Image (spheres, rainbow, N blue to C red):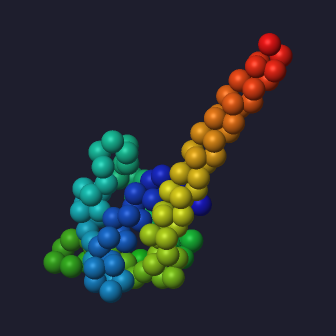
Amino acid sequence: MLSKKQKLLMKVIYSHAIRKEGVCLIRPIDLLKEIPLSSDFRRDELESNLKALVTEDFFEMITTDKKGEEYYCFTLHQNGYAFSRQIAAEKRAIVFKLILTVCGAILSFTLVRILTAIAG
């Protein structure tokens, strides 16, 4: 299970890599720019979250130097390609729980009405 910050990072990396057949070059500053400001993501958290994603085998990450600037080279692995399916499955699970909650509330309301009608 990915943390919220790891999901944000993975969304950015996935969107770049999927356009280029699973491989992309991104500067750390560009990676941070694409993360929403409301997420409270700091620069010092970037390395630890990227290493956690590498450990969970979402992608391979190589740090390189190009024209004096640091770049990350990402190559998606099987878990990285499955990321979009994982997000879709989480959304379906949330929708299912909401529907189940609403149905439970309607059933409870109906039972209370029936029991009060019977009890008088």
Identify the residue at image location x=77%, y=18%: 116
Q: Horizontal and vertical percent for residue 51? A: 49, 67
Please tell me which residue is depicted at 67% across the width and 28% down the height of the picture.
109
Can you name the residue that lies furthest to the left here? 67
Q: Can residue 117 be seen?
A: yes
Camera-nearest residue between 79 and 44? 79
Task: Spot the residue most to the right.
Answer: 119
Q: Where's residue 74, x and y in %?
A: 37, 78
Residue 31 image-quadrant placement: bottom left
Let me know if residue 64 appears in the view.
no
Front position in the image: 20 or 117: 117
116 lies left or right of 18: right
Residue at horizontal 37%, vertical 43%?
40
Question: Which residue is found at the position 28% from the left and 83% from the top?
Answer: 20
Quadrant of the rendered structure where residue 32 is? bottom left
Q: Left or right: 69 with respect to 80?
A: left
Please state, as top left, top right, bottom left or bottom right, where the N terminus lies in the image: bottom right
Q: Residue furthest bottom?
A: 21
Residue 66 figure quarter: bottom left
The quadrant the C terminus occupies is: top right
The correct choice, above or below, for 114 with respect to 28 in the image is: above
Drawn side of residue 84 relative to residue 109, left or right: left
67 or 116: nearer the viewer: 116
Q: Nearer the viewer, residue 22 or 63?
A: 22
